Image (cartoon, helix red, strand yellow):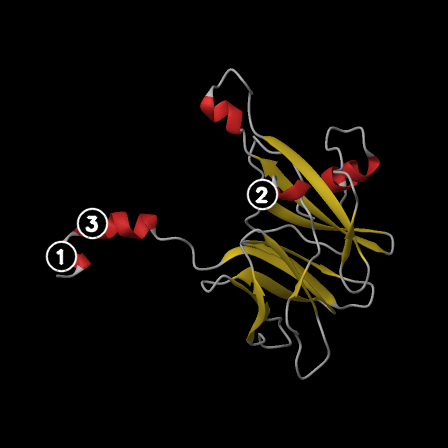
Amino acid sequence: MNATDFPALASAHADAAPSLWRQTTVLPVGAGEHEAYSIGPDQLVWSYRLATPDHNAGRLTCTQLPAEHFACARLQSRQVLLVSMAQQKLYWSLENGQPERWGTPQRCGYTNANGLYPMEQVHLLQLGFEVLLGVLARRTNVLGKINPTLAPEDSYQFWVGRWTGSGFDFGRKPVSLRGDDSLGNAFLFGKPDAFSDSASGENPASKPMVRSR
């Protein structure tokens, strides 16, 4: 039996099939060239040098970075920094020289309120010479599920860590995203040239609107 024997079934299967490549983000390389980063069907981040009128496209390269959500940035050193979230763990990888461009992904020493807040998104932001990592975390409304009158909704917190060159140093308290915190506002409204918009980044209305660049 083939799916083509049942057109309605085949159509329903096609509609339900997830996208093989997700959260594609494009970074400038220089001299009019760009490189795309995306989560592949193996749940790892891959890179691909885009073609230009003068150069052919580069090969598809796996960074070995596991990801459900990721962010990328080009540092002052011109190296690409990747940060990802996978199975409630944070990872980072920094571009090396040739021949091995990407080393083994490293774990971030991040603590999200004693594990009460599952991570949902990661974002990178450059402020001057500093690179900051923002982590959007959610505290599930357990009481509200038992009795909706006990609590109105889930709550969100935004934790920020500073890139040290060998990892991230997180603050002891979350950053406010209500417009009364300068660091929170930088993530909400900042538009640094070194970062590009995600082609498929999502900001649900029920979550704080964290810009993807």
Which quadrant of the structure image shows residue 75?
Answer: bottom right
Depth check, front residue: 27 or 210: 210
28 over 142 or under it: above or below = below
Give 54 or 150, whichever is nearer the viewer: 150
The outermost residue toward the right is 128
Q: Residue at x 54, y 18 (%)?
A: 150
Query: Disc 3 marks which residue?
Result: 9
Residue drawn at 66 percent across, 81 percent down: 100
Q: Position of residue 7 (x, y in %)?
A: 18, 51
Which class describes the residues within 10 Å of circle 1: few (<14), some (14-19), or many (20+)?
few
Relative to 17, say whether 206 is above or below. Answer: above
Instruction: Pick the residue in front: 189 or 131.
Output: 131
Per the model, the C-alpha gap separating discs 1 and 2 is 44 Å
Residue 90: x and y, percent?
Answer: 63, 55
Q: Is residue 124 above or below residue 43?
A: above
Residue 5, label in figure: 1
Residue 82 in the figure: left or right of residue 132:
left
From where the camera sits, is residue 182 visible?
A: yes
Marks 2/3: CA distance? 36 Å
Q: Which residue is mark 2?
A: 118
- Image coords of residue 108 (percent x, y): 69, 58
Q: Amino acid at mark 3?
A: Leu
